[in-house]
């Protein structure tokens, strides 16, 4: 009864397009039928009420993503048709194809580097689950002609269930690095199987690769041959490697804490069968890896920032807390720029010098 009236209060106060009810530990333990309450509330108030069975938010972040994704497929996808394409945006001779991005979170707005490319090709993004997603967009995902899986470990179940329910083909790809962006665009064209789209895709890729190569040349000259320790996980454990290799950098090792076996197979394709993969990277191990291999920069998540700074190692944040977007062709330029600013910062020679009192003591000992 309390849950029923809480749902009513939320609807009366905010008029949301939908209400999501997340199970907690107590109802799960005593066996309360939260789903039945949600169904009754939806019938009474006319607003979709979606139960999410994640009692007390158990499990890891990836498990939470999967549970939420399953709830979306079960209760939301297929409950509304996409809006008609406005006549003002129609272009003569270009057929519009609907697509969706699964496991894309638009970190630091980096997806906005990619959307203009998709728009130019006539690919309308119905939904990006869950970056920038709106309820009414998730409702239309069943009409996507192709789904791109961006982060497989988090929401691969969504792509698989949409394929089972609506026969929507999908592929796994990345928007990091010139080669991977181009391959993702080609995969869309391949699965949609439109000869005109394929022709326009190749023309766009040729134009963008030539344009971005000219912009990257000055940065490549400064980054070529530099060594990188990449300590992250999941899709970034291999997708960022491709981006760094596009810049002429050498990745000495990569983290695989949250990576799948498919991710590890991609790492071996990029780095060779003897690729060094770090399942667990405690601070001492990371510092030793940097010093033993002459690493120029550590690329990792924010939790490793203080380890790097205390050891006076150049550090670039690659996880979701970062402020810069690295996806798409333009994202490559930003990644190169941030790497050069990090590695060549004048602060590193300064902090690596002995402190004045140490220099004085050393001079006295030498005398």
Image (spheres, rainbow, N blue to C red):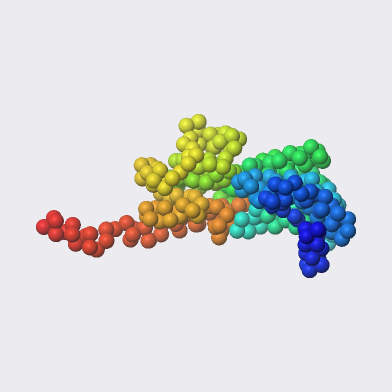
Residue 358: percent from the left, percent from the top? 23, 59
Q: Residue furthest top?
A: 273
Q: Is 235 left or right of 278, judged from the image as shown?
A: right
Q: Residue furthest front?
A: 30
Residue 36: percent from the left, percent from the top? 82, 50
Residue 100: percent from the left, percent from the top? 74, 48
Q: Up-down: is 193 above or below 217?
A: above
Q: Residue at x 37, y 53 (%)?
A: 311
Residue 138: percent from the left, percent from the top? 77, 52
Q: Up-down: is 234 above or below 349?
A: above
Nearer to me, 325 or 232: 232
Q: Is 60 left or right of 118, judged from the image as shown?
A: left
Q: Quadrant of the N terminus?
A: bottom right
For residue 247, say whether it is visible: yes
For residue 185, say whether it is visible: no
Q: Residue furthest bottom?
A: 13
Q: Is 36 left or right of 154, judged from the image as shown?
A: right
Q: Residue at x 59, y 37 (%)?
A: 260
Q: Quadrant of the C terminus?
A: bottom left
Q: Up-down: is 359 above or below 145?
A: below
Q: Residue at x 53, y 34 (%)?
A: 268
Count of picture labels: 0
């Amino acid at each position: 009864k309390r849950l029923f009236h809480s749902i009513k209060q939320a609807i009366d106060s905010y008029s949301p397009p939908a209400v999501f009810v997340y199970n907690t530990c107590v109802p799960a333990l005593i066996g309360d039928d939260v789903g039945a309450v949600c169904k009754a509330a939806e019938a009474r108030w006319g607003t979709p009420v979606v139960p999410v069975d994640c009692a007390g938010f158990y499990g890891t972040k990836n498990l939470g993503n999967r549970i939420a994704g399953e709830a979306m497929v079960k209760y939301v996808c297929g409950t509304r048709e996409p809006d008609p394409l406005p006549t003002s945006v129609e272009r003569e001779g270009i057929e519009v194809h609907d697509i969706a991005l699964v496991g894309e979170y638009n970190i630091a707005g980096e997806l906005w580097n990619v959307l203009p490319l998709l728009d130019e090709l006539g690919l309308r993004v119905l939904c990006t689950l869950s970056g920038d997603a709106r309820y009414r967009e998730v409702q239309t995902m069943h009409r996507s002609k192709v789904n791109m899986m961006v982060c497989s470990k988090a929401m691969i179940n969504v792509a698989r269930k949409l394929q089972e329910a609506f026969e929507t083909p999908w592929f796994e790809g990345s928007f990091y690095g010139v080669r991977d962006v181009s391959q993702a665009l080609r995969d869309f064209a391949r699965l949609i199987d439109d000869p005109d789209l394929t022709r326009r895709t190749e023309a766009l890729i040729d134009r963008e690769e030539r344009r971005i190569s000219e912009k990257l040349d000055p940065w490549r000259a400064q980054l070529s041959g530099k060594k990188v320790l990449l300590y992250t996980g999941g899709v970034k454990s291999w997708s960022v490697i491709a981006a760094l290799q596009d810049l002429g950098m050498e990745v000495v090792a990569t983290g695989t804490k949250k990576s799948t076996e498919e991710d590890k197979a991609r790492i071996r394709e990029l780095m060779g069968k003897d690729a060094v993969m770090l399942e667990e990277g405690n601070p001492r191990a990371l510092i030793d890896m940097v010093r033993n291999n002459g690493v120029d920069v550590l690329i990792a998540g924010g939790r490793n920032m203080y380890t790097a700074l205390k050891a006076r190692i150049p550090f670039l944040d690659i996880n979701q807390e970062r402020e810069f977007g690295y996806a798409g062709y333009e994202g490559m330029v930003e990644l190169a720029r941030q790497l050069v600013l990090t590695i060549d910062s004048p602060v590193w020679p300064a902090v690596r010098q002995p402190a004045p009192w140490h220099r004085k003591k050393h001079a006295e000992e030498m005398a």
